[in-house]
Image (cartoon, grey):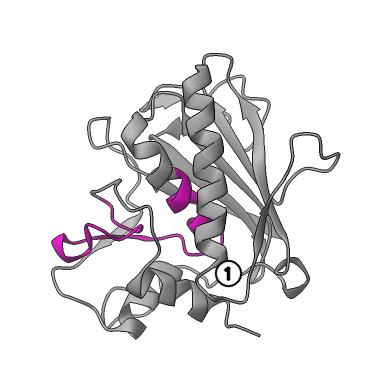
Amino acid sequence: MRHWLAAILVCLTCPAAAQEFIQTDALLSDDAFYRLVACAAPPGADCSKPMIYWPQEKRSALRVGFVTKTPALAPWQERIYTRALIEAVAEINKVGGGIQLQVAAPSDDSAPDIAMHVLDTRPGEVMENTGVPVLEGRVLSLGQVMVRARNSWIDQAVISMSVDTPRRAIASVVLEEVVQALGLMTDIRSPVYRRSVFSEDSNSGTRLRGQDAMAIRRHYPPT
């Protein structure tokens, strides 16, 4: 049986959302950091989520692209979203992991493996009339990714973002959501990690460095 798992990017000014982060005040070892983001393991504790991965046959060219863009999206916003996705894919591809992404063209006949939707839903409101059954009735807290997995293997991911995402945060949010769609679905709340793409309290990370890059390489070892 396939199951949908959710990772939610919380809007701090919106109503409370499901907790999808773990809090720590210390700098973590590489092992502890990886286990936190990959299986929601608090430092020194067991996993609270399953480890999930894209299957080997998808890893050489995992396709990600926009499927829905609300008409409420201004031309300047659309340009930022498009550039943000191109840069996010390039950033992931250069960390040296055993997974490579490619941007799906709008004219492609088949749906991308990671389907992105920019909706006119405001942060904190319920998504309605999206045309995407898995999103209907869920609260959109700025951005979120839904990943469908069977056993340990992902076969579909859906990212939803609000048209009201602040301009300065779009690049960071797109990068975080695409990274989480790889199976690294838990954020970290810590002043030590505010510049991490996995930071619960900051939308400023646009580069994969240090432990962020390490986590991708460990989840998808180079071949």
Q: Position of residue 131 (x, y in %)?
A: 68, 25
Q: Could you say which is closer to the camera, residue 47 or residue 58?
A: 58
Label tally: 1
Q: Which residues are magenta?
A: 174-200
- Residue drawn at x 63%, y 72% is 152
Q: Is residue 132 magenta?
A: no
Task: Determine the image quadrant of residue 143.
Answer: top left
Q: Which residue is mark 1?
A: 52
Q: Quadrant of the C terminus?
A: bottom right
| Helix, strand or loop at mark 1 | loop
**Amino acid carrying mark 1 in the image:** Ile
Q: Position of residue 52 (x, y in %)?
A: 58, 69
Regarding residue 73, the answer to whether it shows in the image is no
Q: Could you say which is closer to the camera, residue 156 or residue 194?
A: 194
Task: Determine the image quadrant of residue 27.
Answer: bottom left
- Residue drawn at x 30%, y 61% is 196
Number of other residues with Cα within 10 Å of mark 1, as a class: few under 14, some 14 to 19, many 20 or more: many
Q: Is residue 179 magenta?
A: yes
Residue 147 falls left or right of residue 10? right
- Residue drawn at x 73%, y 74% is 56
Regarding residue 115, the answer to whether it shows in the image is yes
